[in-house]
Image (spheres, rainbow, N blue to C red):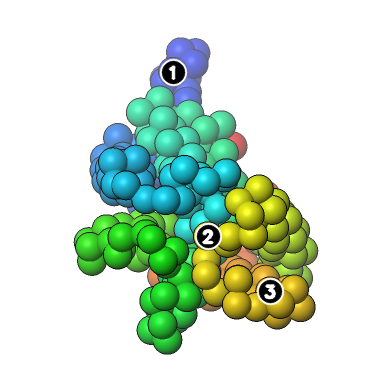
């Protein structure tokens, strides 16, 4: 009988090679997973570079471009993908777990950004763009408001174990995020002489702004359900996995055998 290797690196590699049975492709890995996370980071840093090198009055205001939900969300997505690429390079289960925790927040937020931005922009772009801000070229516009959602979808559908965040808990998370962003927006406006990063907020009274944030929280919760359903549609579902009822150990970073 062959003796089992005591080398911790070999043991870790064997562990990570056994991906979750409902995960489409191996991840973390130095193959497709690393390429997806690297490509995503290149796109995200291209977006941030545009903010730095392009003259924009928002860059001189208190709160910088982080007044925008788009940029705050992109920062979370960058952090998730940084953990993702580090997990791919090191084959670390802990970093993979952290990537998936952040992705549970980042993916629905990116979904919200895409839906809200393109929906409102189709009505009137001026509602979203500071009067003195330059209109971004189409490729830059998509790098902020479309490509991050696509990369999050690739990570979710191909490189992640099943989510465990249900609709009702997601409402609580969404409410907390919406409330935090509301206070942040008002704090920025107070420091910037009442100027909002999104002109739309300046046209609304307090109650109307609250309704916008409530609507965004609902979209976030719906996104959790939609994205979870897409993952199930793409990768299937099992009620019992290796004799263990589904849901007993399906935390976001779980890999088979851990």
Residue at x-position 42% and y-position 75% = 126
Q: Left or right: 125 with respect to 112?
A: left
Q: Image quarter for residue 149? A: bottom left
Q: Local crowd at mark 1 within 10 Å, few (<14), some, or many (≥20)?
A: few
**Mark 2 vs 1, N-terminal side:** 1
The residue labelled by disc 1 is 9
Residue 92 on image: x %, y %: 48, 29
The residue labelled by disc 2 is 197
Residue 138 on image: x %, y %: 23, 66
The residue labelled by disc 3 is 209
Residue 152 on image: x %, y %: 42, 57
Q: Local crowd at mark 2 within 10 Å, few (<14), some, or many (≥20)?
A: many
Q: Quadrant of the C terminus?
A: top right
Task: Identify whether 129 is placed above or below 244.
Answer: below
Q: Are marks 2 and 3 in contact (CB under 8 Å)?
A: no
Compute the Cα span from label 1 to label 3.
53 Å
Secondary element at image label 1:
helix
Residue at x-position 57% and y-position 44% = 62
User: Closer to the observer: label 2 or label 3?
Assistant: 2
Secondary element at image label 3:
helix
Outermost residue on the top side: it is 7
Task: Identify whether 91 is placed above or below 238.
Answer: above
**Mark 2 vs 3, N-terminal side:** 2
User: Closer to the observer: label 1 or label 3?
Assistant: 3
Compute the Cα span from label 2 to label 1.
49 Å
Residue at x-position 47% and y-position 43% = 60
């Amino acid at each position: 009988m062959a003796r089992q290797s005591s080398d911790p690196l070999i043991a870790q590699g064997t562990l990570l090679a056994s991906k979750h049975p409902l995960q489409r492709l191996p991840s973390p890995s130095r193959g497709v997973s690393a390429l997806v996370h690297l490509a995503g980071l290149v796109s995200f840093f291209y977006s941030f570079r545009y903010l730095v090198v392009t003259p924009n009055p928002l860059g001189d205001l208190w709160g910088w471009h982080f007044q925008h939900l788009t940029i705050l969300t992109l920062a979370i997505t960058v952090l998730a993908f940084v953990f993702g690429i580090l997990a791919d390079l090191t084959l670390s289960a802990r970093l993979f777990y952290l990537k998936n925790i952040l992705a549970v927040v980042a993916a629905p937020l990116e979904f919200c950004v895409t839906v809200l931005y393109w929906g409102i922009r189709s009505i009137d772009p001026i509602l979203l763009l500071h009067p003195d801000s330059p209109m971004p070229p189409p490729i830059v516009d998509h790098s902020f408001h479309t490509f991050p959602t696509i990369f999050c979808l690739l990570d979710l559908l191909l490189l992640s174990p099943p989510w465990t965040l249900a609709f009702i808990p997601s409402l609580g998370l969404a409410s907390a995020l919406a409330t935090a962003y509301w206070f942040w927006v008002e704090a920025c406006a107070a420091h910037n002489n009442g100027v909002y990063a999104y002109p739309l907020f300046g046209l609304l009274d307090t109650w109307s702004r609250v309704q916008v944030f409530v609507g965004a929280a609902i979209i976030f919760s719906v996104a959790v359900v939609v994205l979870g359903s897409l993952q199930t549609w793409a990768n299937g579902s099992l009620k019992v996995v290796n004799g263990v009822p589904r849901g007993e150990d399906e935390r976001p970073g779980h890999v088979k055998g851990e």
